[in-house]
Amino acid sequence: MTADVLQLDLLTSRYNYYAVVLLLGIGLYTLIESPNLVKKVIGMNIFQTGIFLFFITLAFRTGANPPIVTKGGGPYVSPLPHVLILTAIVVGVSLTAVALALIVRIYSEYGTLDEDTLEELYYD
């Protein structure tokens, strides 16, 4: 195979990484550009999903068996990335719940979720 064919094959077979970059980009853009606090939490969750997909994609091994040792086994998939992502999902859900609870409290106190308005109210 020539180098051009290998590069094209590499670009077309690694679509997971395109999804990772897309999710990270959308999440980061939403975090930075949106003045609404709820949208910032949504952006944080999208960014977090991109990171989860990246770690799970890195853990993939072609031709590997589940991490259950059997007679005549071959290369095994490491369960560590999957366990770490499962833990990160639980932490992410908890963080989202706390953030939304704080947002509800901020709205009941100040009557707005706009970051710029909250900053003006706080410093005046």
Image (spheres, helix red, strand yellow):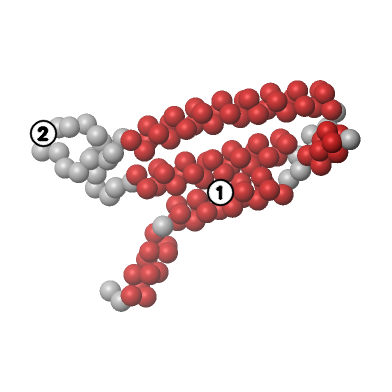
- Look at the numbered disc 1 and give the secondary structure of its residue: helix
Q: Residue furthest right?
A: 124
In the picture, the disc for residue 23 is 1
Give the label on residue 71, or none.
2
Residue at screen point 61% across, 46% down: 27
Q: CA distance from mark 1 to mark 2?
A: 41 Å
The quadrant in which residue 76 appears is top left
- Residue 35: % across, % down: 76, 43
The residue lying at 42 percent from left, 62 percent from top is 12
Q: Amino acid at mark 2?
A: Lys
Rendered residue at 40%/47% (across/down):
57
Q: Is residue 71 above or below residue 12?
A: above
Q: Position of residue 65 (x, y in %)?
A: 23, 40
Identify the mark nearer the N-term, 1 or 2. Answer: 1
Task: Please identify the quarter of the rendering in which residue 45 is found.
Answer: top right
- Name the quadrant of the N terminus: bottom left
Q: For the C terminus, give its image quadrant.
A: top right
Residue 100: image tag: none
Q: Is residue 50 above or below residue 86?
A: below
- Mark 1 nearby-residue class (10 Å; few <14, some 14–19, many ≥20): many
**Residue 80 pos. (x, y %):** 33, 35
| Horizontal arrangement in the rendering, residue 66 relative to residue 108 (left or right) | left
**Mark 1 belongs to which amino acid?**
Leu
- Percent position of residue 92, x then y: 54, 31
Which residue lies most toward the front here? 123
116 left or right, relative to 25: right
| Secondary structure found at label 2 | loop
What residue is at 65 percent from the left and 51 percent from the top?
Answer: 29
